[in-house]
Image (cartoon, rainbow, N blue to C red):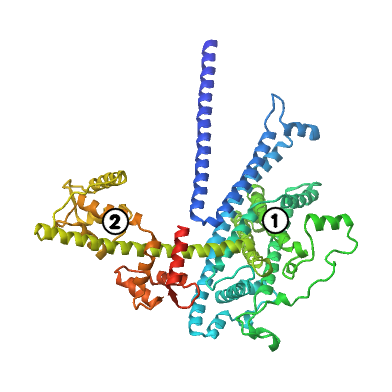
Amino acid sequence: EGGEGEKDEKAEEEAEAAIKTRWGFAFVTIIIVFSVGFESGVEFIKEKIPEDLQEVVSALLEELTTLGFLGFAFFITTVPIGGSESLIAQASMYSLHEPEALEELFEGLHYLVFFVSLSFIMCTVLGLYHFHWTGNAAWARYEAQGLEVTTAANKSKDLEATRRVLAIPPEFSNPEGSLMKEWSKPDHICQAEYLRIRTRFIAECEEVTLSEDFPFHTYLQKRASEVFSGMIKITPYDWLATWLLLSLFFGVVQEGVTADRLLALYWFLLLLITALCLLLQAKMVWIKQQLIPRLPSELQSSANRTDKLVCAPVYKDQSTFSSNSYLPKGTPQTVQSFLKHVLNYRIGTKQERLFWFSSLGPIVMSHLIRLSMFWSIISLAMLLSHHMPGVVHLGVELFGHVWTGWVIFITIVVLHGVAIAIIYVTARVYTLCTSIEMLVDEELLTKVVRDQKYEKCQKAIEMLFTLHFYMQQLKFVAEMAKEDEAARQSTGSATPRSVAFEPKSEEEKKAMEELRQLFEMYDRDKSGELSPDEVGELLGTMGVRMQGKELDNLIRLMDKDASGEISLDELAGVMLSRKKMEKEVKLSEVGTELFEMFDQDGQGEISLDEMIMTLEGLGKNWDMEDIRNFFEVLDADGGGTVDKQEFMDFIADVEAIK
């Protein structure tokens, strides 16, 4: 019996060990699945968002690393060390004489850190959606519509049409910064405000000269990316402010802690955060109203009216400080020295004084926006991790039904989402107010202007090389036609003989071998010849995009024996010769020929109409907008015509960039 009992006990131990092993493998599998899911989610977000917002994802991962370290620290304190009690058990024994007294508290904090991380991820994804697919899309739409109207007005010299777009009726005026008026504002009023700011920004910019088509929304989008990524990065000052808030919270509850008291304090904290969010948005809306330029008709004094589309905004009417009254009387010298030399506290500009704290106003406002978001995330995490049972129980006590408690809980979660959405709207307004007038980001502005010029030049480069290719094609067609004629005369045959293509260099031999492999891949019936459709597919694989008449002309050129099918030698004779011609000829060498091709009347100047007629004559479906943009880049002085010197100078610049 004793032996059988030992066997049964051993079998139970083995079975228990097997179950533990299976559970251990299941836990490892779950961890791997979550890791793969997280990495896949990060990669998906990086692919979907523009390059400007990639910094936001990096900032999020940095903060998640910090929160992960906090979770790891909480875990370490609960693990026994060297056979003795854990650190938290030792602290509990020392203070409360019970080893388990503080373990539950630390488990709750560990749980809270997890939900803070989860809330942080959800709020950041919501912010990415708001900043890119809502806010920046609205700015781009306003700019596109405004450019369309102003371009038409400039052509017709009808300034009244532009002023109508910029007009804001008195009933939509919001000088006091009312949130109700801001929230109920129609879209066309938001567009008018945006276009007023853009018009003044371009006209009054002193750092660089801006063109009428300056992408103002791109500048704002890049600034918004900087602001959003800054919101994600929690600074030591923000942690200090959070610690002070929590100190106040724990200071209140340390005597007579009860679940009801904790829940009541949580409600108070939630109301405090909501009030802070609304206060910050009201402040930023008021600042924006002070920065919106006025129309000449809106100026109080007719003597100040000008012919400009927009005039200085309201904040310009402020008086300038001439004393050191920005520091309260009696401020200790050490505090004054710290503020002036460490924090660079000084008399603020007119725009900085619209914020609180004079010259530190914009910086303090950014910290307050960041704190409101961080505290909202902590509040949401506390609700999910600790206060959900209490909220549901409150609904049962008040209304006698469990479902009412869940309705209250879901409503509070939605309120957190609304608060965070308000924060993101506030951050967008903050971006606008700290990117114009006296707070222009000169470095970023210069970069945007440089990128705009490079983009225009890149399009012009593509246009030039497309023209170059067509010139080469015309030349090649003419040369091959001469060879065909000579072959006909020498053989007396109506159809020239097909001659095998012979590579003359190692490079041509390598290119010929690659072409042979590609040819054999498309020669599915192994007949040694390709149909016109198969040739079109092969050319597409080589990166040569041709359709319709262009493809028919090229295939007709290849088909030496007029069989309707293309052999490898026929294909190589055209494509490798064409590749050699493209490699050897430079744009500067054919610049004069390109110019003469456009200058149809021989007057030494090119007009836009001549360029359009020439390009249409080449038989390609050209984009008229690309042609106009190309001409605008060539026409540096805006005279409406391009002489030969301007054309050759541009080609020289293109080759330098290339």
Mark 1 residue type? Leu
Against 206, is 20 above or below? above
Crowd class of label 2 (few under 14; some 14 to 19; many from 20; radius 10 Å): some
Q: Is 162 displayed left or right of 420 in the figure? A: left
Q: Give the CA distance from mark 2 to mark 1.
A: 64 Å
Q: Nearer the viewer, residue 73 or 235?
A: 235
The residue carrying mark 1 is 371
Q: Assess disc 1: are there few (<14), some (14-19) or many (≥20) residues with their C-alpha within 10 Å of its C-alpha.
A: many
Q: Is residue 266 left or right of residue 462?
A: right
Q: Nearer the viewer, mark 2 or mark 1?
A: 2
Q: Secondary structure at mark 1?
A: helix
**Most foreground residue, 606 or 456:** 606
**Residue 4 position within the rendered picture, expressed as x and y whole percent measured from the top left:** 51, 13
Q: Quadrant of the C terminus?
A: bottom left
Label 2: state its secondary structure: helix
**Residue tagged by mark 2?**
578
